[in-house]
Each structure stands twice: as C-alpha cells, then as structure tokens.
Amino acid sequence: MTPSGTLFTNARLQDGGLHDIAVSNGRIDAIAPAGSAVKTADIVDIGGALLVPGFVEGHIHLDTSFYGDKWIPHKPCTDGFDVHERVAFQAENMAGAAPMAERARNQLDLCIANGSLQMRSHVMVDGSVGLTSLETILEVREAYRHLIDIQLVAFPQSGILKSPGTLELMDEAVAMGADLVGGLDPLSFDRDIKGHLDVIFGIAEKRGVDIDIHLHDAGSLGAMTIEDICARTVALGMQGHVAVSHAYGLGDLAPDAARRIAALIAKSGVSIMTNAPGNHNFPPVALLRDAGVNVFSGSDNIRDSWWPFGDGDMLHRAEIIAYRSGFYTDPALVSAFDVVTAAGARALRLEGYGIAVGAKADFVALSAEHVPEAVVAFPKPRRVFKAGRLVAENGAVLR
Ligand SMILES: [Zn+2]
C-alpha cells in the first residue's frame, strides 16, 4: 500500500473473521487476516466491530421532509387515502416550513450518521413548483458530495398528463442534472398508461437516463402497469435500468399469480423498491428474490406530510422488512440486509460497491457479532467512513 494510505485493523467481516484492510486514494487496496498487514503510520483500529458496506438509501424525498424543523401533526385525508388531497396538504405544510435546503441538509445528516453513503432521492417537478425544488436539491447535493453520493429523480408528483407543462419540465430537469426520470401511478393518476409511459420512456431514451416509477396502485391495476413497464423495458433494451417503487399491487396477488409476474420482472431486469410500510400490503420480498428479482429499499418519506415516521436508518429498515416478511432464519435475515446494501447497489448501478479489493472504501463499523444480529438489533453506535475518511460517529456528522 502507498504511504499515504490508511490501515483499518481488526475489522470483522461477514465471514466472521478479523481482517486488516488497506485503503489508499479512497479505495480498498488489500484485505488480509488481522495482524498480517504491514503497519503504516495511519492506523484506524476497528476493534473487532462488524464492518459492512455503507447502506444504500434507495428511495427518499429530500425536498419534502420536515425533519429537524418544527413538528407538523399529521392531517388525515377527509374520505380515505387520496393522493391528490395529500399533495394539497403537502403544499400547505411546505409553505410554512423552514427553507428547503435546511430541511434537506437535516435529513442528509440523519442518513449519513446512520451509515447511508449512497442515495436516490426523488424531487418534485410539476407545474406548481417548476424546477425550483430541483435547483435547491442540486445545490445541496454539491455541498454534500464528499459525504454521500446522491442520484436525483425528476418526480412528477402531480402527474404528467394532468399537470400541463410537466413533460417539458421533466425533460429540462434531466438536462439540469437530474439523473433519472420518475413517474406516478400511470393508470390511477393520469388515467392513461400509454400516454404516461410514452413520456417517461421517451425522455429516458432521448437523454440516456434510467427510470424509477412510483406505483401505489393495488391488485391487478398495479400488476397490469408492471407488465407494461416490463414490456417497454425489454423492447428498449433497458434491462437493469428501470425500477418500480412501492409496487404495492404485488402484495395483493395470490402466490401463483405473484410467481408468474415475478418471473416476468426478473427477465425484464426491473428492480422493485419496497420500504415495507405498515398499513399496506407490500411486495413479497422472499418470493421475488427467489424468482431472481432485484429488491431494494429506502426510507421513502421521513417526517413529512405523508406520515410522521422515518429515522433515516437503513439497518432499521432491514429489520422492518424482515419483521413484516416473517424472516427468522439467519439466511433470511441476511437477505433483508442484502436488500439495503448489495441489492440497492445493483438497482442504482453503483460502481465499486462492497468490501472488496478495488472497491470504494465506504463502510460502517457496527457493534454486532454478525449480520443477522445487526439486522435484529440495528445497534446505534456506528462509525461511518466515506472514501476511507471518518465522516460520522455517535449519531453526528463530523465537519
Ligand atoms: Zn416516494
């Protein structure tokens, strides 16, 4: 290793053994049994803690959280859940909130302190806010570049066809620096699956970007939309470049129907994001994974107009997924961990992810013996390293 490097000693890896990890220029140069590596001037003793890759926060909304601002009591919809009404409540709440950049920074600090070093955030783009939210979040992303890698999705929160000008705004959003095109319930929101998907896939094809679509539609409505998304993905050769977030409908299907569509999703290389929310059916994680579907996760909303929950902790998210999925065995708990780490890296197409020679030195040291224990206990004392540099400990980002 180079003299400028750092040696991380006594790190417990997922094989259970203690290792020394040599890092230089932000990358892992070598991994050797503890005590066998050449000592350098710069040594960080991991002290036998479990060292895991930085978590992948695969779905969050940096523009709409009130985390760190005043508490905003949740307002229920007047006649059952209604996305349009929730969007209106959100606009009211945001008008009286702290500046968006401040709220986004609060949320990022929370996520980084918990060990997320890679993120995908949806940012609202519609006729009412135009591109102003994206402009703000792009600036915040720049300020946090040394702490966390962030992908931004141009998210049509008010629909595309129902919100005049949104098509042009989304296209412009990508030109400005958004990394992906988003979507929202093509059937139930815009009432035009073809028109909605034409826009999304059209921009993606023209600009050469990936796609991540919010799909809350239940049962066959959701399943039908997923089938169309899969067909377009294959037709355009976009396997591995498309994600469907939430996909609640998959949780409503009988096992046979779920297995059939799971095979189609796997073949199409479409990733499914779930945060296993408490009051919804959600995708059958084990069934999907068994079929070869890439399932990843995110916090989604944190203390916003949609719900008061969220702690920015993807290890806790793995516990929620495991708990709601009935995962008890060690292999099942490890699979929940995979959802918030390696599967997220696949969905986000991250280069150099993981604890391996040549990978980025982005990792988290945890007080746990092994991954199954980490998932059930989600221990809070954590040391978070980005590019081999300590960026957070004891729940706070270091500056
Ligand atoms: Zn979302």
Image (tube, rainbow, N blue to C red):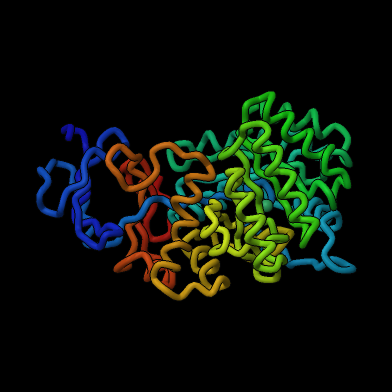
Quarter holding residue 230: top right
Q: Position of residue 251 (x, y in %)?
A: 68, 65
Q: Reply above or below: 277 against 352.
A: below
Residue 11 shows in this picture: yes
Q: Nearer the viewer, residue 149 or 253?
A: 253
Q: Position of residue 209 (x, y in %)?
A: 62, 31
Q: Residue at x 56, y 40 (%)?
A: 240
Which image quadrant for residue 234? top right
**Residue 68 in sight here:** no
Q: Residue at x 45, y 57 (%)?
A: 338
Percent of width and height locating residue 74: 75, 67
**Figure quadrant of the N terminus:** top left
On the picture, is 264 further left or further right than 79?
left
Identify the residue at image location x=19%, y=45%.
Answer: 7
Image quadrant containing the C terminus: top left
Q: Is residue 292 or residue 168 the one in the foreground? A: 292
